Amino acid sequence: MFSTAVDIALIVAIAAVTVAVIALIGFKLARSSRDLGSEAELATYTTLHTAGLAAPFLRTGLSPAGAGKAARYLREMLGSNDLVITDESSMLAWDGAHGPREEEAMALARQVLDSGRTQVFRKPRLAVPGADLRENPVTEAVFSPIQVQDRVVGTVGAYTERVGASLVRAANEVAGWVATQIELAELDASRTLLMEAEVRALRAQISPHFIYNSLNAIASYILTDPVRARELVIEFADFTRYSFRRHGDFTTVAEELQSIDRYLLLERARFGERLKVSLQIGPEVLSTVIPFLSLQPLVENAVRHGLEAKEGTGHITIAAHDAGAYAVVTIEDDGVGMDPEHLRQVLAGHTEGDHVGLRNVDSRLRQVYGDEHGLVVETAPGQGTLITMRVPKFQPDNVV
């Protein structure tokens, strides 16, 4: 009897706890629903969330891999039985229960690709030969063009039992959203190509002037100090190997400083005691990732435009220190300086062949990190120049 009473008590207690848990879950669900607002707000949130899940897969362009992963989310957004994504020549992906044949899907897609307009296709053209339509109720479809600027680069096709006006509008919106992701992918690719072109331009700007002066300096030591000449040839080879390397748009502060050391060694062979250099480098910033050839051109700018035209000794100070989430690098010279208005014209790209390295570095920093991370330049005629570069320690997405 006692055991039975205990069992009953346990059952009652478990039942009470279960009811409490169910009530708590119901309360949380109800509260979550209230927090999201009305049904319209909940639907908007769901759509935006689903679009956010699909977006990363399309940011590399319209490819089979990306389309295959995005198709599921796009079908959820449209609420269709099946969804197809095509490019201009083939079916890239589909998601759904029935999986239309590629030749069938492309026959419909081509009509949209040719016309550039959304089209609705109704039965019996969608009936798969030999299939029982009672088992496969998908008999209608809407295909919308993916239009990037003036080009139709693909289509989004939604299959369902019956295509209504709301599905047509939704398919158009989804196709337009996909087109936006493709445009962003092309913009990313264009930005990468632009950065590569700017690095090539920077190399071309460095090489004629610097190589000519370096070789002249090395030649001057061949008869008087052949050991020194041999050392300079090795430094020159290491410097040019780094500057003209073919891999990677990014490097570290340590690697860039090593290249600068070689550059200054070669310049000292030309300037002699006229060129003085001070270094103030915090070891904690040496591993910070920065765009390739972003410091050396600033030092070269200080030598060429700051000290070369100055009489007597010129002094360059290179400093790097930790600033919380940022690494701050400064390059200061006591050279001839420049007019601030002329500097603004240089950075805006309104001058040709003048301070190319300075403008190039400023442009690339803004492309990678945003406009707030462009170079800060303080200068005035006869007052030297101080250049400050403030770089986030985190690695940008396009660092390989």
Image (tube, rainbow, N blue to C red):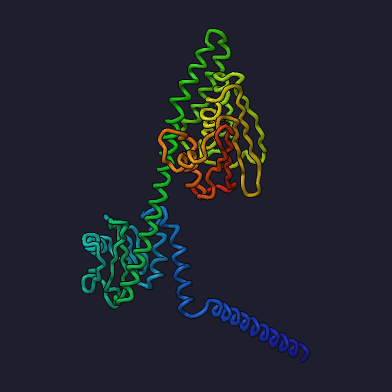
- Vertically, is 360 above or below 7? above
Residue 380 on image: x %, y %: 56, 37
Q: At which x and y percent is residue 178?
A: 37, 61
Query: In this rendering, does residue 130 appear at all?
Result: no
In this view, the residue in front, 97 or 245, is 245
Q: Depth check: 312 or 26 in front? A: 312
Residue 6 in the figure: left or right of residue 127: right
Could you tell me residue 364's position as x and y percent? 48, 43
Q: Quadrant of residue 18?
A: bottom right
- Between 122 and 338, which is closer to the camera in this rendering? 338
Residue drawn at 55 percent across, 23 percent down: 267
Q: Is residue 211 above or below residue 328?
A: above
> Is 306 drawn above or below residue 151 in the view shown?
above
x%, y% of residue 226?
Answer: 55, 10
Q: Write the residue at 56% across / 38% down.
A: 379
Question: In the shown orientation, is residue 383 left or right of residue 45?
Answer: right
Quick one: which residue is furthest to the top in this view?
A: 223
Identify the residue at the far right of this view: 2
Q: Name the foreground residue: 107 vs 220.
A: 220
In what quadrant of the picture does the N terminus appear? bottom right
Look at 26% across and 67% down and name the residue there: 118
What count of labels does the image hold? 0
Residue 59 showing in the rendered view: yes
Figure check: 110 above or below 386 = below
